[in-house]
Amino acid sequence: MQLLQKASADVSASDCARLMLDGLPPVMWFIRRNMRQHRTCGLSVPQFRALAVLNAQPTSCLSAVAEYLGTSQPSTSRLITGMVARGLVERDECATDRRQLSLRLTPQGKALLATAREATLRRLADEVKSLSESDQKMIAGAMAILREMFGRPEGTQ
């Protein structure tokens, strides 16, 4: 693919950042558009993301989920309340601070997340399969680097 070859030429950190800012939003919009279009498992994108963060960080507090979603605590609280009502999330007293609530996925929430994730993966795979094997490897490598770089807790190297 011409764009990948051009993008892999000598680039500065600033050029790389610009390419990320230009390239990642369309990927996220593709995922969001397909989730909305198919209403994967009846989940909204924020619900899917909340399930994903609770799966990755079991027993998270509401503020951590709100920060991850980029929403206010009241908005996140309403979202979580709906997910509790559906039996996807449980609220418990936090072991270290009784004023805090600890959130965790129920078995039903885990199963729904797995189903939604599989549907999303299939749709992405359908889109990517038209790329050459070398382009797929290049994208996989870049995603592994980005996950390693941005998947760490803040302040760690």
Image (tube, rainbow, N blue to C red):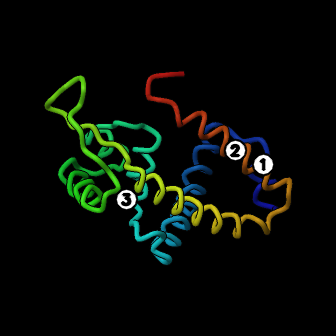
The amino acid type of the residue labelled 3 equals Pro
Dot 2 corresponds to which residue?
Answer: 142
x and y, in percent, of residue 148 in the image: 60, 34
Residue designated by label 1: 138
Task: Give the residue number, with chain letter if any, for mark 3.
Answer: 46
Q: Quadrant of the C terminus?
A: top right
- The quarter of the picture where residue 154 lies is top left
- Which of the two labelled residues, at mark 1 and mark 3, occupies the earlier sequence position? 3
* Vertical arrangement, residue 142 with respect to residue 116, above or below: above
* Rendered position, 128 above or below 38: above
Screen quadrant of the N terminus: bottom right
Identified by mark 1, the residue type is Met
Residue situated furthest front in the rendering: 107
> Residue 92, percent across and down?
23, 39
Q: Nearer the viewer, residue 85 or 33?
A: 85
Residues tagged 1 and 2 counted as in contact (Cβ below 8 A): yes
Query: What residue is shown at x 33% (from left), y 37% (from top)?
Result: 60
Task: Give the CA separation, mark 1 to mark 2.
Answer: 6 Å
